[in-house]
Amino acid sequence: MRDDLGTGELSAAPGAVASVGAGHGETTIVLPHVALPGARWRVPSLRVSFAGPVYGRVALGSLFAGCLAVVVFAAAGPTVLVPSSAYAFPAWVAGPLDGLFGHLIADPLTLSYGLSAVVVAMTVAYVVALASVRMLSMRTIVIAIVAFHVVLLLGPPLQLTDLFNYLGYARLGALHHLSPYSHVIAGEQQDPIYGLTSWHNLPSPYGPAFTLLTYPLALLPLPVAYWVLKLATVLASLGFIALVWRCARQLGRDPRFAVLFVAANPIFLIYELGGFHNDVFMLVPAMASISLLLDGRDRRSGAALILAVAVKFTMVLLLPFLLLAARPPRRRARFLTGAALATAPLAAASVAAFGFSIPNLSDQSTILTTFSGPNLVGLSLGLGGAPPMLLRVANVVAVVVVAILVAAVARGRRDWLSAAGFATLALLASLAWLMPWYVVWLLPLAAIGSSLRLRRVALAVTVFLLISFAPATGILLAKLHLNPIGSSVGQAANARWERLAH
């Protein structure tokens, strides 16, 4: 049964036509699924008559201009765009654009409004690019994506300090011989990385595979390690996008839409790639697992999924859906064999390096971000936010939703990729500590799955997170004297954050 009865990438019911405007200025949007004669791909169903190749190229150019503007201002000097710059901002952090454009605006309020405006403009460009994707060649899209990656590589990490935390945990283990799962970055206060980090009292929440892969960086001079990790992140991001392309082709969908849906997303660009977060290191083996399963290489698929879980535990969510997709039962057995064969050496390496300590997945789950699902529910119920009891309920609800989706796939009532996407959405909704780039877990599943509803929800979540985390939103709330985490519940969560960060 076709999930959500959707037949196209962004379609409504077949044959639907929507008209906007009147007279000679009328704009027509044709929505049904269209198949290219002789082609294996299903092209996106959204076609806007004004969205020709020129509009698509202008949209991609606008996305590039937005990335470039943010990088130029971030590299110009210590600003709110780069939190670690409040402590130090050496030239090796700023990058090659440091001082290239002279002294630029550094006023925090102006930059906060400016970043918010740029993100809004990029979101509009993203929608136009998706509407124009039928008119764009794959070559044009690839050139644009590579350009995005190159310009973001040149700048410092935007918005948060996670890149320095990765290096801090690596140096804690490899240089100071303290397990990052049982010790904290505060144990290396004399290390030059300390002042650039943020989670000083948080044992590492990252998987053993990622942690061990970062250990060799600790043996390099800090500026070199910084640039090696940035370059590795950009290359992993390109590999992840290439796998989205491959999965779309394997499923008979137009890879142009799938690639652009993920790689042109403003959150992916500014927060995930611009912040050099490690989610792409998890998503590469996760998408490889899906691609390998689609190719019938089940043992390798199982091994790839275990590697993704060993990078970040989040991807364990894919396991039941991949198992259901591996039919008949002999394929499932091969998948589990591959998973077991990968688990053994990874577990042995983890025990050898860290003993029986495991990633710290609990502490961050007790901290609230203003617009996380549990906090918003708690506020609407008059609880002043999300107390621990409500967080436990949110976790139970997420597990129940995932179980229902697994059962629906088992009965053949849902596409397994789209069901995995809705399960990821349930996880995002249950998180107390919700960051904008977490939507990247959802985007590839929405891009290659069959559910129109999931794609719409992914776009809605993108807009919600962009508005929620836009600096202008926080400024506006402060001017209105609104503090969604100002209650006793929020104060307790803030106290936990202070303890872990400082």
Image (tube, rainbow, N blue to C red):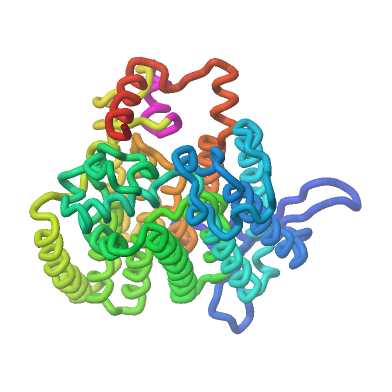
For image coordinates 28% across by 29% down, the residue present is 499
Q: Position of residue 464 (x, y in %)?
A: 53, 39
Was residue 381 drawn as part of the magenta stretch in this picture? yes
User: Quadrant location of residue 305?
Assistant: bottom left
For image coordinates 33% across by 52% down, the residue present is 166
Q: Position of residue 436 (x, y in %)?
A: 46, 44
For image coordinates 19% across by 75% down, the residue present is 334
User: Quadrant location of residue 112?
Assistant: top right
Relative depth, front residue between 348 and 99: 99
Was residue 372 drawn as part of the magenta stretch in this picture? yes
Task: Count every numbered label the image shows and give the total.
Answer: 0
Vertical relation: 252 (above or below) 367: below
Relative depth, front residue between 481 and 382: 481
Query: Would residue 19 be found to the left or right of residue 147 on screen?
Result: right
Q: Is residue 304 visible?
A: yes
Q: Position of residue 444 (x, y in %)?
A: 45, 60
Q: Is residue 323 visible?
A: no
Name, please, the residue furthest toward the right: 24
Q: Quadrant of the N terminus?
A: bottom left
For image coordinates 58% across by 47% down, the residue present is 74
Query: Would residue 70 be found to the left or right of residue 360 on screen?
Result: right
Q: Quadrant of the C terminus?
A: top left
Vertical relation: 49 (above or below) 165: below
Vertical relation: 257 (above or below) 446: below
Name, please, the residue furthest toward the bottom: 38
Q: Position of residue 139 (x, y in %)?
A: 63, 76
Q: Start and end of the magenta stretch? A: 370-382
